Structure formats: structure tokens, C-alpha cells
Image (cartoon, grey):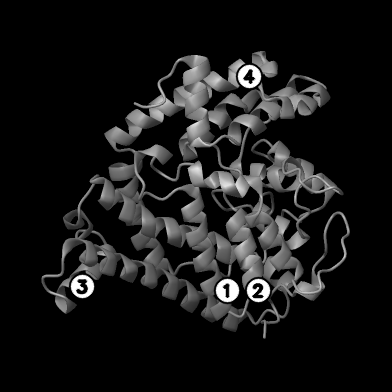
Amino acid sequence: MLAPYACQPDQSRGRLFPERLSSFRSPFQRDRDRIIHSSAFRRLKHKTQVFVEHEGDYYRTRLTHTIEVAQVARTIAGVLNLNTDLAEAVALAHDLGHTPFGHTGEDAMERLMAPWGGFDHNAQALRIVTRLERHYADFDGLNLTWETLEGIAKHNGPVRSPNADEKHAHSEKGGGLPYALAEVNAAWDLELDTHASAEAQVAAIADDVAYSHHDLHDGLRSGLFTEDDLMELPVTGPAFAEVDRLYPGLDKMRRRHEALRRVFGRMVEDVIAVAQNRLSAAQPKSVDEIRHMGTTVIRFSKPLYQELKAIRSFLFTRMYRAPSVMVERARVTKVVDGLFPLFLENPGLLPETWASDIAAAKDQVELARVIADYVAGMTDRFALQEGERLLGIPAQA
């Protein structure tokens, strides 16, 4: 039984293009399945999480990260009696708009697209699922339900005033909405001044849980820091100490796994406890009450949030901005910086399948957005190959 504040499939606001209901899948299950079967989802397997895709077989990619986020989202949503299918659908779609080379590529695209309306990966995900996936006879995109689109747009919080107080939000005073988000919202009002459903909030916190856990794991495997370093941090230090007490002399890899699974569990249990307390206190009677609460119901406790800030600060210094990572960031930035203006000047270099988009561009702004769609959709592998072929930048460092 779903909670009264959960998104009920039979009360969905439907799809922009009406379709017959499935006889054996709910609307949110169909959304999930369409996302999994999309071309953009498959490309995530060759897109950077932190380390560029070719650097190691064991490091997370955008795809494995996304799968881990979806698993966490289903777990939390299930305990809270929310709609697990919707939470999973939003989790599976949340990174579809990422460029090659992770946040490095996004930083480059945001700078390159500044004259043409900017670039935002959440907004790009919406552009993908409403426009760029072209497999169905009756519509462009995946024709997802309103609730899934809302979750993609607002899982990090409202995206404009009056409640746009999250770091990911886009204030109208600060330059307006990203064009990709504005286009979708113009076609179908996503109520961008409110919070999203509890299911979408679960997907957002699941993202934080997943990367906070697996970036520690990948950082250890890469040798950028050691277990001894983590003994000095909150959450991780006590986790390693507990493992050492329970399993003295445990071999290195098992010790690492046992400690980090405790870190993982601590985060999930904290989120569930906080959500249960907040929901019990607020007693929301509907999903719309969740949207209009003016704050999130799914979040970390304040003590754990502060402890995780210390871990993230450590990761930023020792991993995300490590000298070896910065060398690779500089190299792949050159690829994006070179390919975008080259294609903008010579759009005929794009594959024939993009010819109709190029021809339909009415001005330089629309053309730049087509080029952004193409470059942002590249995998690490393909971008490196094109960088070598067209720019002479070696695909391997």
C-alpha cells in the first residue's frame, strides 16, 4: 500500500501525447522501461563519472553510477511506502544529459554555450527525453509522464522563485531558465516554483549517497589516498575502526569493503529516519502537500550532513582536483573546446542523421544548440576519437 503522499499511478497527470494505458505496466513502469531502452541511457556506459572511461575497468562510469543511484532510490522509496517505480525512473534519467568527460565536459559546454543560452545537464536530460530520442512513430522523445518530467527538472529543488534556495536552482533574477528547461516548461507547466514529489527527492538524495560512497571506493583503488587517510575523517574513520574491532587482521580488500558498506548503510539509515520523522510530524495528505511544503522532506540529518561535508571537502582536494586528474581534465577540455567551434563553423561535419536538424535551424542560436546536442551526446571514447581525427589531439595521453 502506498502512502497518501506518494504518487499514485492511477492519478498521474498523464503524457503530453495521450496513449492507451498498458494492461500490465503502470505509467511509471513504462517510463522506467523507456528510459532503460533509450539510446542516451546506453551511452552512459562510456561516459565519465570521475575518471575518464578508458582509465580503468573497475572505476564507476555514468551508467554504473546511475544503476547504483536507482538501487538506493528503490530501497528508500520502498521503506517510506512511496512509488518505487517513479523513484527509479527519475534516478535512471537524472544523468542522461551529462556530457562526455563528466563535470569537466559540462564546465566546457557551459562556457562555450554562454552566448547561446548556456548549458545545464539537468535541462539537457529533459531535452533528450522530450525531443532528441527519436524512435517512436507518434512523437519525438520518450513521451514520459508529467511526474517523471517534473522529477527530472526539480529533483534538486525548485528551479525558480520563490523557493529556489538550492545550489542547483536557477533564479530568474540570475539569468532565467536554461533554454532546454524553458522549452519543455512552455509546452507543459512543470510548476518550477515548487518542490518535486517525495519520489524525486528520494532520487536526488540517492545520488548523494551513491557518489559519496563510490567515490571513496574509486579514490582508494586509484591510489589517490589510502585507508589511513580515511581513518582521520568522520563517518569513515569510525567505520574502519569498527571493522578492525570485529575482524582483526582482515585482508585489505575485505576490510575496505566492510568499512565502506557501513558508510553506505549509515547514510541510507539516516535518510530514512529523518524522512520518517519529518513525514510523521507534517502528516501530508497528498503529493501536492509535499510539493508545497516549502522544504524537502527527504534529506540527511544536520549532524551527518556536516560530517559528509568534511568527506566531500577531502574528496575535492585529494581526488577531484588531484594533480593527475587535473592533467586529464586539461587534456579533455581541449577536445571539447576544439570540437564545438569546429562543428559550429562546419556543421556539414556532423553525421547525415543530423542534417535535418541543421537545416531546420533558423539562426545561429538554434544551430549552436544543435551542435551542443551532438557534442553533449558523445561518449568519452567517441569524443576522444573525433578529437584525434579532426584536431590531432592524441586519444591516449
Residue drawn at 34 percent across, 32 percent down: 326
Q: Secondary structure at mark 1?
A: helix
Front residue of 5 and 282: 5
Task: Give whichever of discs 2 and 4 has the lower sequence position.
Answer: 2
Question: Horizontal placement of 369 versus 242: left or right?
Answer: right
Q: Secondary structure at mark 4?
A: helix
Is the residue marked by circle 2 packed among few (<14), some (14-19), or many (20+) residues within 10 Å?
A: many
Q: Nearer the viewer, mark 2 or mark 4?
A: 4
Vertical placement of 226 versus 385: above or below? below
Is the residue marked by circle 3 packed among few (<14), some (14-19), or many (20+) residues within 10 Å?
A: many
Are dots 2 and 3 in contact, CB under 8 Å? no
The residue tagged 3 is 243
Are dots 1 and 2 in contact, CB under 8 Å? yes
- Is residue 293 at all visible to an observer of this figure? no
The residue tagged 2 is 83
Q: Amino acid at mark 1?
A: Ala
User: Which numbered marker is on residue 383?
Assistant: none
Q: Amino acid at mark 4?
A: Phe
Q: Position of residue 103 (x, y in %)?
A: 48, 39
Is the residue marked by circle 1 packed among few (<14), some (14-19), or many (20+) residues within 10 Å?
A: many
